[in-house]
Image (cartoon, helix red, strand yellow):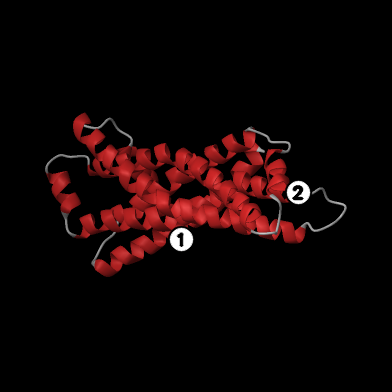
Amino acid sequence: MMGLSALQHTGEYFMLLGKVFRLPDRQRMFWRQYSRELEKQGLQSLPIVVIISVFIGAILTIQAKINTENPLLPTYTTGLLTRETLLLEFSSTILCLILAGKVGSNIASEIGTMRITEQIDALEIMGVNSANYLILPKILALVTMMPFLVIISISVGLVGGWGVGAFTDVITVADYLVGIQYAFNPYFVWYGIIKSLVFAFIITSLSSYYGYYARGGALDVGRASTNAVVNSNIIILFSDLLLTKLLL
């Protein structure tokens, strides 16, 4: 039964994507919606990205220093570990897991509310491709903004680690700066960006799917929002495993 349910969800999901990725009927309306979604999903997510990244950068630096206090290890190891953790995992995967809770739940509840209040049915009656009109701008907006959020997260996280060296006696600023520059591989930045683009698509498309097919009342909208966040996180982690195997 669960297998049949999963198969049904998969089929409905790809059928929905078929309706989404079509040329918009009204280009002017699409670009207007797209610009709104850039602000809603990108710019409004910036504060939480900055706050979380600066604290994570500081925490990683302290933890790395505690776990590398060995006279056999070079002093730059702490900065090196902080940089690699931010580049390889936090600023792409963990950040997207966090954004799945913020952006994904918002998308699912917004579209779900439109579904149960019959606004989507009204669009269909007027001959509008509701999936394309509502979902495509959201997907493209987050995919567009995600690389910038990742770069900002990496930068702010490194600044958070620098703050530990500047305002505490855990590590010196000189050792930290040497560590974050040592053996730097630019490909790791591209690796994080590529992963984040895939995760952004997963967040927006899955959340839109659960909201689009919500049925019932307010309780069902909440359930759709919860399902969107949980399933997005699961698929992001599974995709992270595959992408790590393919790209590294």
- Frontmost residue, 149 versus 102: 149
Q: Nearer the viewer, residue 156 or 137?
A: 156
Q: Is residue 110 visible?
A: yes
Q: Position of residue 103 (x, y in %)?
A: 38, 53
Q: Residues within 10 Å of mark 2 (few under 14, many from 20)?
A: many
- Amino acid type, residue under disc 1 in the picture: Val
- Residue 207: give x, y in percent of width and height: 37, 53
Residue 243 spot, x, y in % from top left: 60, 42
Residue drawn at (34%, 38%) of the image: 18
Q: Quadrant of residue 29?
A: top left
Nearer mark to the viewer, of 2 and 1: 2
Q: Secondary structure at mark 1?
A: helix
Q: Pointer 2: what residue?
A: 77
Q: Which residue is at 50% across, 56% downward?
A: 52
Q: Decide if residue 143 is on the left or right side of residue 117.
A: right
**Residue identified by numbered label 1:** 230
